[in-house]
Image: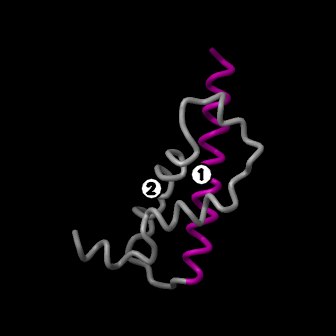
Amino acid sequence: MEEDIKKRILSLDQLVELAMETMDEELPWDVVDIKPKQAYSMMAAHVLDMLEGDSQADKEIVMLTVMVRLLVENMFLNLMLGNHRM
């Protein structure tokens, strides 16, 4: 387990922080039951799990950050669509 953590290019917190730097402030987070930090943390954990073990750091940092942002925005839109159907 410790070896897996050492292989990661970023920690979960670092990835969340980088992804949230470009967060869209216009998303109406108040209409869903999840906070932005929670959403970004869940998606960042998922991205890190998917790409664990790769080693091209600079390229991957950009890719991971963009992937997390897109996943969070997609999740948010799905939550909004679900709320509108109720």
Disc 2 marks a residue whose amino acid type is: His
**Towards the viewer: 70 or 28:** 28
According to the picture, the residue beneath numbered tag 1 turns out to be 71
Q: Residue at x 23, y 73 (%)?
A: 2
Does 69 appear in magenta? yes
Quarter of the image for residue 67 reads: bottom right
| Element assignment for label 2 | helix
**Towards the viewer: 61 or 24:** 24
According to the picture, the residue beneath numbered tag 2 turns out to be 46
Q: Position of residue 21 (x, y in %)?
A: 66, 62
Q: Which stretch is magenta? A: 58-86
Q: CA distance from mark 1 to mark 2?
A: 9 Å
Quarter of the image for residue 76 reads: top right
- Give the vertical position of 74 relative to 45 (above or below): above
- Give the vertical position of 28 relative to 84 (above or below): below
- Give the vertical position of 24 relative to 84 (above or below): below
Specify the quadrant that holds the C terminus: top right
Specify the quadrant that holds the N terminus: bottom left
Looking at this view, name the residue that lies furthest to the top: 86
Say whether marks 1 and 2 touch (CB < 8 Å).
yes
Looking at this view, name the residue that lies furthest to the left: 1
The secondary structure that dominates the magenta segment is: helix
Disc 1 marks a residue whose amino acid type is: Leu
Q: Position of residue 52 (x, y in %)?
A: 39, 71
Q: Position of residue 38 (x, y in %)?
A: 50, 45
